[in-house]
Image (cartoon, rainbow, N blue to C red):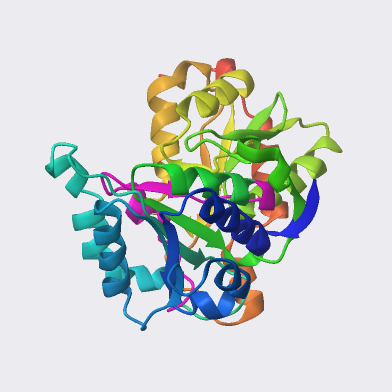
Amino acid sequence: MTQMTFHDAVEAALHEEMARDPRVLMFGEGTATKRKGLLKAFGPARVRNTPLAEGIITGTAAGAAATGLRPVVDLTFAPFLCFAMDELVNSAGKLRYMSGGQFSFPMVALAMTGGGWSVGAQHNHNLEAWFVHAPGLKVVMPSTPADAKGLMKAAIRDENPVLFFMDIGLLFTPGDVPGEEAGDETMVPLGQAAICREGTDVTLISYAKTVHACLAAAETLAGQGVSAEVVDLRTLKPLDEATILASVRRTGRAVIVHEASRLCGVGAEIAALISEQAFESLKAPLVRLTGPDAPVSASYPLEQAFAPQADAIAEAARQLAARNLEAAPIW
């Protein structure tokens, strides 16, 4: 194991995959400037800066993928994906199906998202649910450096376009990461959630930075006699429905937490999944804790208040643990 930041773990994955497969290349806004190690190792033909033109960058990547290359593009901040929606959704996401499988689009689009840098609403907007809703796209949003490396390797090898969201608040957070000598054992399969902490009274379901808030809340709850299980989704599409349902069936209660706005967010899909397939196991109503339906402030304290914090999660779980639908008829 090696200690490295989330940012460096992504670069380590890129380096290993580019060394393994000459079809992998990377380009985007400031890519060669920000990732000088990759530029030195693989040269300007495979690592290059581009103009600030997200649609052109993404369209080029889709075309490159269709010809057999495996491009990774850096589009910087998630709101800039608005300029690449046609290329991502209408081209990369749909053309494999429309071609009857004659073409594949093995490409990865990187974007930073979430609070932590006080960059303001036009640079900080959690848009992951948009792309979960788009057929043909896969969506990844890890919470640790180890998962960032493992999921990036899996994303590059996937035959479909993958949106890889990097939470700004986690970029320079260090963690243990398996080294290159571990080989393919470092890969984290797409669509496989992780149980970060086992519990029996309530399930806390989350992804990206709010996983850490859930873990902190679980620690607080343990001191108050409430056993909380923490599920890190890691991949939003494909969604690991089996792990979610198994956990909620064990605990009978669930709090779903994410920084993105509540309306039509990933949490709504998870709540519907649990209601449809595990309703008989519920001992209390489902609870969602999310960001508000508002643009994000550039003020650091307000930006932090935008995302659910550990104390609010602990309080919601504590109240939920005290409820029991079995004590009264549900009709």
Q: Quadrant of residue 181?
A: top right
The structure residue drawn at horizontal position 64% and vertical position 57%, both measured from the top left corner, is 12
Please check the rendered image and state whether residue 89 is part of the magenta-colored stretch, yes or no: no
What is the magenta segment's predominant secondary structure?
A: loop
Q: Nearer the viewer, residue 306 or 64?
A: 64
Write down the region rendered in magenta: 122-146
Residue drawn at x 59%, y 29% is 253
Vertical position of residue 69 compared to residue 51: above or below? above
Q: Tell me: 114 left or right of 196.
A: left
Q: Residue at x 51, y 72 (%)?
A: 43
Q: Is residue 160 visible?
A: yes
The spot of residue 202 in percent (x, y) is 65, 30
Find residue 25 and report its image quarter. bottom left
Image side of residue 111 versus residue 143, left or right = left
Q: Quadrant of the C terminus?
A: top left
Q: Nearer the viewer, residue 20 or 8?
A: 20
